[in-house]
């Protein structure tokens, strides 16, 4: 089935038109936020009760549990509590799940890691300098869904893996800092 059959793609706000004065005080959801949400503590949160019913006024604001997709990096993640209330720009889309047999964590796994999805994206990428997926192409991507139980298992395992990888990377960085500091102390 096509992605548009199971999610509604809500494109983020065009920030170049900053016509509201209070836009200046709001923080924009960034690629770093997406990666932190993807690698961070989402599993510790209980955002799965999110209903996907943002009202139109706040539809550009990030809500914990929102599935967001970056058109620039073709990565999907789930907004954590740390990034609540940030403006979703036109470089991102909220993927509002409309099909009750779709797990949000599994959706992120499929969009980020599925060979079939990567192949479809690569064929469809547009842009001469920076290949970029468009909302229309995103909606047309074909996805095959296993049972909801299998989706939950795969989705949870995927986010556990992402978190473990992020923690291992952080540990390696801290070990490097420690060793370099010890070497500096010995060199004095």
Image (cartoon, rainbow, N blue to C red):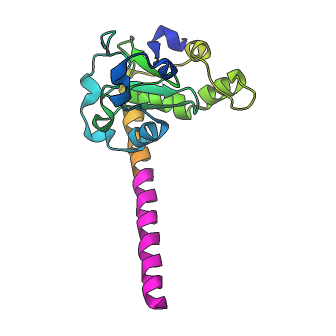
Task: Describe residue 110's horizontal placement relative to residue 170 as left or right.
Answer: right
Q: Is residue 182 visible?
A: yes
> Magenta span has 158?
no
Nearer to us in this view, 70 or 38: 70
Q: Residue at x 43, y 28 (%)?
A: 106
> Magenta span has 172?
yes
Q: Where does the N terminus fall, quadrant-wise?
A: top right
Relative to 121, residue 160 above or below = below
Q: Residue at x 49, y 17 (%)?
A: 17
Question: Which residue is farthest front?
Answer: 21
Nearer to us in this view, 166 or 135: 135
Give the image location of residue 168, x and y in percent.
43, 58
Q: Residue at x 54, y 19 (%)?
A: 143
Task: Describe residue 73's horizontal placement relative to residue 169 as left or right.
Answer: right
Give the image location of residue 43, x and y in percent.
31, 39
Relative to 166, residue 8 above or below = above
Q: Is residue 86 visible?
A: no
Nearer to us in this view, 33 or 76: 33
- Magenta stretch, overall SS: helix
Give the image location of residue 8, x and y in percent.
44, 11
Quarter of the view holding residue 151: top left
Give the magenta part as a residue range.
Answer: 165-188
Give the image location of residue 69, x and y in percent.
49, 26
Nearer to us in this view, 49 or 79: 79
Quarter of the view holding residue 37: top left
* Numbered label tally: 0
Q: Residue at x 41, y 44 (%)?
A: 39
């Amino acid at each position: 089935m096509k992605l548009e059959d199971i999610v509604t793609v809500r494109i983020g706000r065009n920030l170049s038109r900053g016509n509201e004065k209070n836009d200046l005080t709001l923080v924009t959801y960034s690629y770093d936020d997406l990666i932190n949400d993807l690698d961070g503590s989402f599993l510790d949160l209980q955002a799965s009760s999110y209903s996907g019913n943002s009202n139109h006024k706040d539809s550009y604001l990030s809500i914990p549990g929102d599935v967001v997709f970056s058109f620039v990096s073709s990565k999907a993640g789930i907004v954590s509590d740390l990034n609540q209330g940030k403006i979703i720009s036109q470089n991102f889309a909220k993927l509002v799940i409309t099909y009750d047999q779709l797990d949000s964590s599994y959706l992120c796994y499929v969009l980020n890691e599925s060979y079939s999805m990567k192949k479809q994206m690569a064929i469809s990428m547009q842009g001469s300098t920076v290949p970029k997926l468009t909302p229309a192409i995103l909606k047309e991507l074909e996805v095959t869904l296993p049972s909801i139980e299998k989706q939950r298992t795969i989705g949870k395992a995927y986010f556990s893996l992402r978190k473990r990888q992020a923690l291992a990377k952080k540990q390696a960085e801290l070990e490097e800092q420690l060793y370099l500091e010890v070497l500096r102390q010995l060199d004095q």
